[in-house]
Image (cartoon, rainbow, N blue to C red):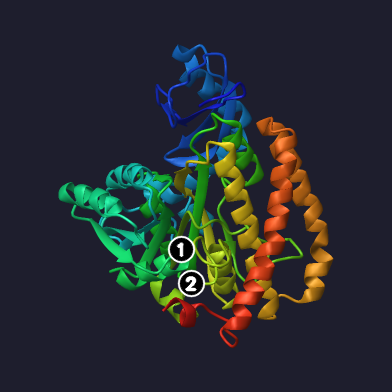
Amino acid sequence: MSDGGSVWVGLLELGSDFVVALGRPAAVSQIPARIMVRLHGAPVGYVEIPLQPAETLAVRAQASAENILAESLRHHREAHRLGSEAISQPEWASQVACPQDFPVHNGAGVSVIVCTRGRPVALAECLQALRRVDYEPLEILVVDNAPTSAATRDVVEQFALDDPRIRYSCEPRPGLSNARNHGLAAAKNDLVAFTDDDILVDPNWPAALAAGFAADPQAACVTGLVASRSLETRSERYFDSRYSWGEAFHARRYDLASNRDGSSLYPFKAGIFGTGANFAVHKTVVDQLGGFDARLGAGGPGRGGEDLDMFVRIILSGKRLCYVPSALVWHQHRADDQALAEQVYAYGHGLGAYLAKRLMTREMPVALLVRSMGQSVVMARQMRQASRASQMMARGRRLAASEAWGVLSGAWCFYRVSRRGRGRLSTGRSLAR
């Protein structure tokens, strides 16, 4: 149910006569609209304008974009021009800038893995979006994690009747890392893309991920943009403001050489590389690293952090991670306060477990963690901003305290679990297989 601070979310391709609604039609007319603007299929930024009058929404959004996003649009048009001129050695950023230039047929095979547990309704929406993808060769594998009913299997088999790319597999051991490792083992292609059952993928998504790998032979992982699908409730707006998944519109590369982030925490700073709802890897690379750590991830002792862990392990192994914003997906945030509270605590718990692993493996010096305590001030500021943006008030402060407690609990939990399995700290293979 929407509330008084609702924001309508839409998508505009420049030159189009209409704005596509991402959530439900607005129940209240006089509310603001947040519209993602794309050019040639590439997201370039947001504009925020009044929703009404609806008949002029596309015209007003385009005019606002040409003004507010003028510099980003200019950069994209230049990158598109360079790509169109077929320069022998264009810059990497130009090669991944424009979806119009991404091949969708006869490219590198991509296996899409959707790990799910007991959410058949959300999964059906996710698969409906995946069916609209025309990239080939492509397979879509749904990994049913520790199922308690046949509901997920029934959904997948129904979709598979009309789309032979879709198939079902079951991982009986609970835990997202176990499900991810199962998907990797079952995938037919070396490029393996992961997304969640609460995600709607853009039709260009697999092509953009594949383009990220094709443009950089050293890339072992490609991540993408995760935008908010709905901002109707205060819980959705809190999540959107607290976790900046959908704000980076410029392609980036990360490694241990010249492509480094400016943070003193690099490469350990959580969240700079992307998130587990939208990434792809070379199957062979992850296999060499030992797979996902079963102590981490939803449904496991860590309750999260398996994606952060994998991203950092890829960087520390000397390989490269690329962020390509045109690899776009839409995330359905938790719509009610209780579900948000559980998710925020789990995120904190996963972060704590991730940090504990970095310290226990001695990859991250204790002195670096101490020096980085100033980062907690930044996190506190983000939490306050999220509370104001969502009109959470006192509830927002309780969420912040819950997230902080989750970090401490996650670190202690990971320490205890790891002590019971001494000697298996570096990777997840011995625990996940």
For disc 1, the neighbor class at 10 Å (few under 14, some 14 to 19, many from 20) is many
* Quadrant in which the C terminus appears: bottom left
User: Based on the displayed image, in which of its 4 quarters is residue 50 positioned?
Assistant: top right
Q: Is 163 left, or right, of 190 in this rendering?
A: left
Task: Say whether disc 2 or disc 1 marks the residue closer to the N-terminus.
Answer: 1
Viewer can see residue 382 = yes
What is the secondary structure assignment of the residue under circle 1?
A: helix
| Frontmost residue, 195 versus 13 | 195
Question: Residue at label 1?
Answer: 176
What is the tally of numbered marks visible in this picture?
A: 2
- 3D distance between C-alphas at marks 2 and 1: 9 Å
Q: Are marks 2 and 1 in contact (CB under 8 Å)?
A: yes
User: Based on the displayed image, in which of its 4 quarters is residue 426 positioned?
Assistant: bottom right
| Frontmost residue, 382 versus 263 | 382
Residue type at the position of mark 2 = Phe
Residue type at the position of mark 1 = Leu
* Position above or below: 39 against 274: above
Q: From the top left corner, tell me how far across and down residue 320 is, in percent.
A: 54, 69
Residue visible at 22% across and 48% down in the picture = 159
Residue visible at 66% across and 44% down in the picture = 242
Q: From the top left corner, tell me how far across and down residue 227 is, in percent.
A: 52, 42
Q: Is 391 left, or right, of 224 in this rendering?
A: right
Residue visible at 51% across and 47% down in the picture = 226
Question: Residue at label 2?
Answer: 292
